[in-house]
Amino acid sequence: MKWEGDRQSDNVDDRRGMGGGGGFGIGGKTVGIGTLVIALIGSVFFGIDPSVILGGGGGPVAVQQGPQGQQAPRQTPANDRETQFVKTTLAYTEDVWTQVFSAQGAQYQPTVLTLFEGATQTACGTGRSATGPFYCPADRRVYIDLDFFRLMEQRFKVAGEFAQAYVIAHEVGHHVQNLLGISDQVHNAQQRAGEREGNALSVRLELQADCFAGLWANRTNQREQILEKGDVETALAAATAIGDDALQRQSQGTVVPDSFTHGSSAQRVRWFTRGLETGSVEQCNTFEARQL
Ligand SMILES: [Zn+2]
């Protein structure tokens, strides 16, 4: 993925090096969980049982922290290559969604992407690395602990910046769903639905976020020519690795479609591809689709 030198977003809130969120009134709770937390990353985004990651297969992909998480706070937030990459990817999402919204006579309000380590306070409760990257509708923020990208590489063998950009674009996709009122509608419908229907609605919401991520890639590539040979394959590999069926097979040996909340690998690949090929919001209507 070619992104170097492109605009970097100012909408990044870097909370790293703050002693695990101590500045946000939750300091004590985060002590001593460094290794464990990183091993647990992915339970929501991946939809997997954390015990799988902690169990066989080489053990946790943990970055060793100091004793009991007592890291010396960094003086200034890091602005290394990875941080610059995240800021640039976020800027791409701002450019694309501003364009899409204004074509409909609306104004896109960008999300704030919060970088954190371990745990941080959010309007949705205490956000933890164990949750994987997530979006909180109540404060309209995306939360990411960048160690998640290490987990993708080491545990799921998904590497490459474009695959990481897909993860960010997927979370921003949830922000767009929030702005459009889709998340609220789904949430309300889920209150009235049983578990099975509720899960089916979650799948449609997640697949739409995947389609929005594909749309983002399509439009960003048109504007900035970011795609390089092999990039799309890495994103498809990511979508495949995090399909519910792949994860269930890995964790329990069997696949139980009714319990899917993110969609199967094939579905995630299909909807990302649809967004990528069309660049069209209308093509991402997973809620009207007869076949996912
Ligand atoms: Zn999602």
Image (cartoon, rainbow, N blue to C red):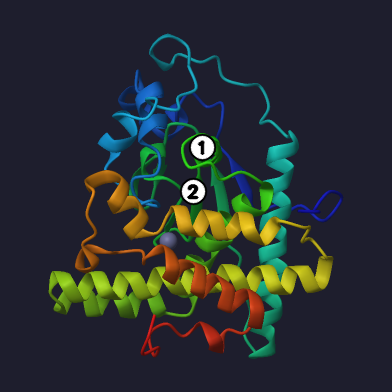
Label at residue 116: 1
In the image, taking residue 263 as reference, residue 23 lies left or right, namely right
Q: CA distance from mark 1 to mark 2?
A: 7 Å
Above or below 279: residue 83: above
What residue is drawn where x is 17% and y is 72%?
Answer: 196
Q: Is residue 109 visible?
A: no
Question: Where residue 207 sits: x, y (%)?
Answer: 43, 71
Question: Where residue 8 sits: x, y (%)?
Answer: 76, 52
Dot 1 amino acid type: Phe
Residue bearing mark 2? 143
Q: Point out the residue furthest to the top here.
A: 67
What residue is drawn where x is 23% and y is 49%?
Answer: 253
Q: Point out the residue furthest to the left here.
A: 194
What residue is drawn where x is 35% and y is 23%?
Answer: 33
Of residues 91 and 59, the one nearer the viewer is 59
1 or 2: tag closer to the N-terminus? 1
Label 1 close to label 2 by CB (< 8 Å): yes
* Residue 212 figure quarter: bottom right
Question: Where residue 231 sits: x, y (%)?
Answer: 70, 57
Dot 2 amino acid type: Tyr
Q: Secondary structure at mark 1?
A: loop
Question: Where residue 189 sits: x, y (%)?
Answer: 23, 80
State which image quarter holds ligand 1.
Answer: bottom left
Above or below 63: residue 150: below
Quarter placement of the C terminus: bottom left
Label 2: how many residues lie within 10 Å, few (<14), some (14-19) or many (20+)?
many
* Residue 103 figure quarter: bottom right
Label 1: how many residues lie within 10 Å, few (<14), some (14-19) or many (20+)?
many
What residue is drawn where x is 69% and y is 39%?
Answer: 82
